[in-house]
Image (spheres, rainbow, N blue to C red):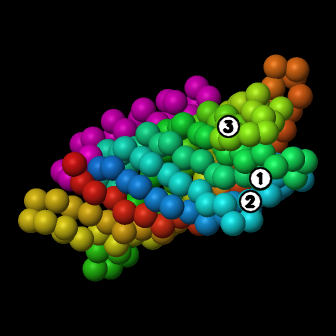
Amino acid sequence: MRVFTATLLAAMLTGLSAAHADGYVSLGVGSRAALSGNLGSQFQSEGISAGRLALGYRSGSLAIEATAFGNGLGSMASDADLATASLGVDLKYHLHIALGIEGYGRAGLHRTWLAQSGQPKSLMTGYQGNGHVLGGGLQYAFELLPVVDAAVWADYSRQAFDLSNEAQQSMSGTADVITVGLSIGL
């Protein structure tokens, strides 16, 4: 954790010296999550989508994002509708390809909870823990208005979870999601 924090801080300080710096907000909707590990054996995600909201700051090729994201889940053992709810910090590195098209890689750390809406109440909602996300994608940047930059994007993310509850029962796994979205400059 300390190594990641030091690397993140150094990257931010290095990136702040670039000539181009912008804040942005980003919203995306994702496909159903492909689950593995304990998550895949206890939950399903057929017909359930994912979503991501981010507030970011980009300087040159480097961006940092505060993210909120989640994946819908259905319990295999009951009719409970659950979801992973995560808050995290991601670091993105953009690479110019051509004519407003960029590729990017993304890595981040997050805190995740299993949340539930509706009834019947599930025992799974007590799980929480830390994890990481790795991903990459493409975006097309354009000028929405004379003073507002925007970008449409599509990316693939793999979120890894290590969750536990108060009884020290643990659950781990991954969720792979393809997300499409829009970013608007602030």
* Image height of 82 relative to 148, above or below: above
Spatial CA distance of label 3 from label 2 is 14 Å
Q: Are marks 2 and 1 in contact (CB under 8 Å)?
A: yes
Identity of the residue drawn at 73% across and 48% down: 81
85 relative position to 78: left or right: left
Residue 14 in the magenta stretch? The answer is yes
Q: Where does the image place residue 28, in percent across and percent down from the top left? A: 46, 59
Q: Where does the image place residue 40, in percent across and percent down from the top left? A: 84, 55
Identity of the residue drawn at 81% across and 26% down: 165
Residue 26 in the magenta stretch? The answer is no
* Disc 2 secondary structure class: loop
Disc 1 marks a residue whose amino acid type is Gly
Q: Is residue 162 visible?
A: no
Which residue ends up furthest to the bottom in the rendered image? Answer: 99
Q: Earlier in the sequence, mark 3 or mark 1?
A: 1
Disc 2 marks a residue whose amino acid type is Ser
Which residue ends up furthest to the left in the rendered image? Answer: 146
Magenta stretch? Answer: 1-23
Q: Earlier in the sequence, mark 2 or mark 1?
A: 2
Query: Which residue carries the number 3 mark?
Result: 115
Q: Which mark is residue 74?
A: 1
* Disc 1 secondary structure class: strand
Query: Which residue carries the number 2 mark?
Result: 45
Q: Are marks 3 and 1 in contact (CB under 8 Å)?
A: no
